[in-house]
Amino acid sequence: MTTKHLIIAGHVQGVGFRDWLTAAARDTSISGWVRNRRDGTVEALLSGDTGAVEDLAQACRRGPRLAMVTDITETLADPPPTPGFVKLPTA
C-alpha cells in the first residue's frame, strides 16, 4: 500500500481534471481526495495498491484531454482516514 500527495501545475483548472481524476480513482479502488487550489494548481491524495497509485500518478502527467500539465510535485503521505475518493472544496 502506498499513499502519495500530488500538486499538479499547468492548465489544470476548468478542464475537468477533478472529475477525470475522481472517476479514474474510483475505477481503480484508490482512496483519497482531489481539490482545486487558489493558486491555480490541483492537489490530490492517492492511496491504495502501490501499482495502481503509481499508474494513476503517472496518468496525472497527461490528465484529461483539455489539460496541459507542466509539473507535478509528489511526496509520500499518510493514508486518508476513510476509504473512498471524494472531491473537496477549493483550498
Image (cartoon, helix red, strand yellow):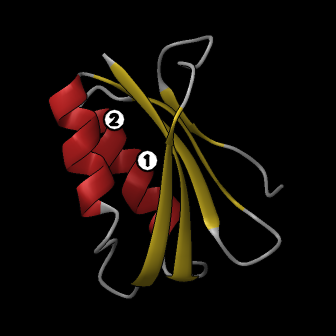
Q: Is residue 5 left or right of residue 60?
A: right
**Residue 31 horizontal side relative to residue 6, left or right:** left
Disc 1: CA contacts within 10 A as few (<14), some (14-19) or many (>=20): many
Q: Secondary structure at mark 1?
A: helix
Q: Quadrant of the C terminus?
A: bottom right
Compared across the picture, whether 18 is left or right of 87 comes to left
Amino acid at circle 1: Thr
Q: Which residue is under mark 1?
A: 22
- Residue 24 lies, with reference to residue 1, above or below; the image says below
The N terminus lies in quadrant:
top left
Is residue 24 shown above or below 13?
above
The residue at 19%/47% (across/down) is: 55
Instruction: Identify residue type, mark 2.
Output: Arg
> Which residue is found at the position 60% from the left and 64% from the top?
42
Rendered location of residue 69, percent (x, y): 42, 81
Q: Position of residue 90 (x, y in %)?
A: 79, 58
Image point (47%, 22%), residue name: 84
Mark 2: few, some, or many residues within 10 Å (few <14, many ≥20)? some
Q: Where, by quadrant of the figure, is residue 77 drawn? A: top right
Tell me if 62 is positioned left or right of 52 in this view.
Answer: right
Frontmost residue, 64 versus 50: 50
Return the x and y of residue 40 as percentages of the image width and height: 71, 78
Secondary structure category for the residue under label 2: helix
Residue 67's quadrant in the figure? bottom left
- Residue at 79 percent across and 75 percent down: it is 39
Residue 48 circle label: none
The image shows residue 30 at horizontal and vertical percentages of 34, 29
Q: Are marks 2 and 1 in contact (CB under 8 Å)?
A: yes
- CA distance separating discs 2 and 1: 6 Å
Q: Which residue is mark 2?
A: 26
Up the image or down, 79 lies above or below 18; here it is above
Depth check, front residue: 82 or 8: 8
